[in-house]
Image: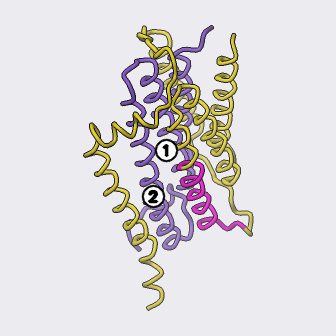
Chain colours: A purple, B yellow
Amino acid sequence: MEVGLSHYLVVSTALFALGIYGVVTRKNAVMVLMGIELILNAANINFVAFSRYGNFGLEGQVMALFVIVLAAAEAAIALAIVLNIYKTFHHVNIDEIEDLKE
Amino acid sequence: MNLYDIIFYLFALVTIVSGFFVVTSKNIVHAAFNLLFTFFGVAGLYVLLGADFIAVVQILVYVGGILILLLFGVMLTNKVVNVDIRAGAGHILPAVIGIGILWGALTAMIAFKTNWIENPAPEMNPTTAGIGNLLITDYVLVFELLGILLLIALIGAASIARRETEELKD
């Protein structure tokens, strides 16, 4: 079977499902972040695949670039927050963190 | 099955299998290193889709930046020397069922129910010049906003991460 658009979309949905699974089941905040990165990568594969097979020019690739930039900003902020949580609670298990302040 | 298909299946396999280990591995450091292979696999898929610039950016930003940041996060928030680096997981069975249904529905709709119009460009050209042109013409406002957003994120992350230590010094 010739590899076409739907092959890339299936890879993307699998990666998306894995990312959701990681976000839902993991207790460690850093692991949840890794799940979010997987989800963003899945969305990016979709953007680039539609950009190629839809023959819309490069718009989809520019969007993928924006998503990568947003992922970088999001990772920096989220890890700063995680470090603060660790300083306050001495762990980063998000299911045990119930207080907004000490 | 030609060479393109074989390389596609190879990269897809690397991406999915290492992605699976990212979300199931007990050891956070193993998960982070599996994330490396996932990012490389996705970069390979971008190359196969003719997106050379995005593939390089993926490796530079994700592998060189975000993954290192995540590893720093792991090292700074876990007791590495005491081997207390395991990450627990809860509610596995409901999650597997729910996400299995979600994934099955998504795959069925996307891959089998929908007739996508496939009209790929006959040849793959270098994309860097085109992306650069789009960034300073059609998307110049988004481009500038993203620059400001990155600056804000940088300052915000530094300020959030430093605040507690300064209070401890007082």
Viewer-nearest residue: B72 or A83 = B72
The vertical placement of B43 against A9, above or below, is below
- How crowded pointer 2 is (Cα within 10 Å; few <14, some 14-19, many 20+) is rated as some
Residue A18 is labelled as: none
- Measured in 3D between alpha carbons, the distance from the residue under mark 2 to the one under mark 1, in whole angstroms, is 11 Å
Percent x, y of residue A28: 57, 55
Q: What residue type is labelled 1?
A: Ile
Q: In this view, does B7 lie to the left or right of A16?
A: right
Question: The C terminus of chain A is located in which quarter?
Answer: bottom left
Viewer-nearest residue: A63 or B31 = A63
Viewer-nearest residue: B53 or B95 = B53
Look at 68% across and 32% down and name the residue there: B14
> Label 2 belongs to which residue?
A78
- Helix, strand or loop: magenta stretch: helix
Magenta region includes residue A44: no
> Label 1 belongs to which residue?
A36
Q: Is mark 2 on a helix, strand or loop?
A: helix
Q: What residue type is labelled 2?
A: Ala
Percent x, y of residue A2: 60, 10
The vertical placement of A57 against A3, above or below, is below
| Disc with the residue nearer the chain's start (2 vs 1) | 1
Mark 1 — on which chain does it sit? A
Find the magenta span and give its range.
B61-80
Q: Quadrant of residue B41?
A: top right
Percent x, y of residue B153: 38, 60
Q: Quadrant of residue A18?
A: top right
Q: Is mark 1 on a helix, strand or loop?
A: helix
The vertical placement of B160 against B4, above or below, is below
Mark 2–mark 1 CB contact (< 8 Å): yes
Look at 46% across and 28% down and name the residue there: A46
Co-location on one chain, circles 2 and 1: yes
How many numbered dots are placed on residues in this image? 2
